[in-house]
Image (tube, helix red, strand yellow):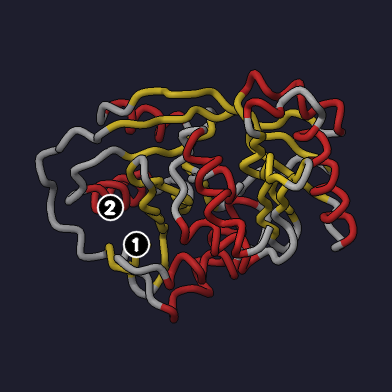
């Protein structure tokens, strides 16, 4: 995939209802050169697969084939090509998040099932404003080293380029909770055609108040819907979000090759956003 393919990528993903915008595709091409693929048949573009690679893990996302060309092995060929690209670049770990009913497609290709997630979406119900939270502020470059360490503790990988890319996005939708110069958590909101995708949303352990302040501040002036993917193990987050009126819109499973990512110890990732990010 190259920049000339972005319009095709936006068209095929919009027809799947995934809500990506041009900035999403530009980010993928920039952060993982050569990792996103276009399938051609008879000279026509018929399928798409994107990847986002970090330090340890390469994540596959957005596997899509035009409906009239399905059933010909194009999706399988795309995934096998992505795995070959990951191996050629030294990655032993490859992951993806798919709808639960599609897990059987990936298992014969070497993937095993990991954690399960719920997709949640809707317009958060307004809450009576609590006390002011002066600890919440937009991200700044000097805070990125702390954010990268906290993120790494929650997901078992180092994703500095991706986080720095989010920090450069306009609109200040990357918020941190800062106390005495220490970052206790952060949240990212990414506008898309379906509303605001929320994630990563990460806090130190036993910091539910921090998580609540981050999410509440992010959506405080929001008038449209939000969407995010929450591990089923994060029961507090699921209860909090459903209490705001968000509803389940899908059930998902994380699939891995090379072993599942290690359990977090000092931090919790409460939510993931678009599946191109892992």
Compare marks 2 and 1 and give the one earlier in the sequence: 1
Neighbours of disc 1 within 10 Å: few (<14), some (14-19), many (20+)? many
Tell me: 49 left or right of 194: right
- Do the numbered discs 2 and 1 sit on residues whose CB atoms are within 8 Å? yes
Label 2 sits on a secondary structure element that is: helix
Please tell me which residue lies in front, 51 or 55: 51
Write the residue at 26% across / 26% down. 245
Q: x, y (%) of residue 177?
A: 34, 62
Question: Disc count in the image?
Answer: 2
Tell me: 157 left or right of 137: right
Which dot marks residue 218?
2
Q: x, y (%) of residue 187?
A: 40, 55
Quarter of the image for the N terminus: give it: bottom right
C-alpha gap between disc 2 and disc 1 = 7 Å
Residue reaching furthest to the bottom? 142
Which dot marks residue 87?
none
Which dot marks residue 175?
1
Q: x, y (%) of residue 30?
A: 61, 68
Label 1 sits on a secondary structure element that is: strand
Tell me: 116 left or right of 213: right
């Amino acid at each position: 995939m190259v920049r000339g393919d972005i319009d095709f990528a936006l068209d095929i993903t919009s027809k799947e209802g995934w809500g990506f915008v041009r900035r999403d595709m530009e980010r993928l091409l920039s952060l993982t050169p050569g990792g996103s693929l276009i399938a051609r048949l008879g000279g026509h573009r018929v399928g798409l697969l994107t990847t986002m690679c970090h330090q340890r893990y390469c994540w596959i996302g957005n596997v899509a084939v035009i409906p009239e060309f399905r059933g010909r092995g194009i999706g399988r060929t795309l995934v096998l090509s992505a795995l070959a690209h990951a191996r050629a670049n030294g990655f032993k770990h490859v992951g993806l998040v798919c709808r639960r009913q599609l897990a059987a497609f990936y298992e014969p290709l070497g993937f095993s099932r990991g954690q399960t997630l719920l997709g949640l979406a809707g317009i958060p119900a307004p809450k009576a404003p609590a006390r002011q939270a002066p600890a919440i502020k937009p991200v700044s470059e000097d805070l990125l080293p702390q954010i990268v360490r906290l993120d790494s503790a929650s997901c078992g990988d180092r994703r500095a380029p991706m986080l720095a890319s989010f920090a450069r996005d306009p609109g200040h939708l990357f918020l941190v909770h800062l106390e005495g110069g220490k970052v206790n958590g952060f949240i990212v909101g990414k506008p898309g055609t379906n509303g605001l995708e929320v994630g990563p949303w990460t806090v130190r352990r036993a910091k539910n108040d921090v998580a609540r302040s981050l999410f509440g501040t992010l959506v405080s002036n929001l008038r449209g819907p939000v969407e995010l993917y929450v591990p089923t193990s994060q029961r507090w987050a699921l209860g909090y979000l459903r209490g705001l009126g968000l509803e389940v819109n899908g059930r998902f499973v994380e699939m891995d090759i090379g072993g599942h990512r290690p359990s977090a110890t000092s931090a919790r990732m409460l939510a993931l956003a678009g599946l191109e990010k892992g």
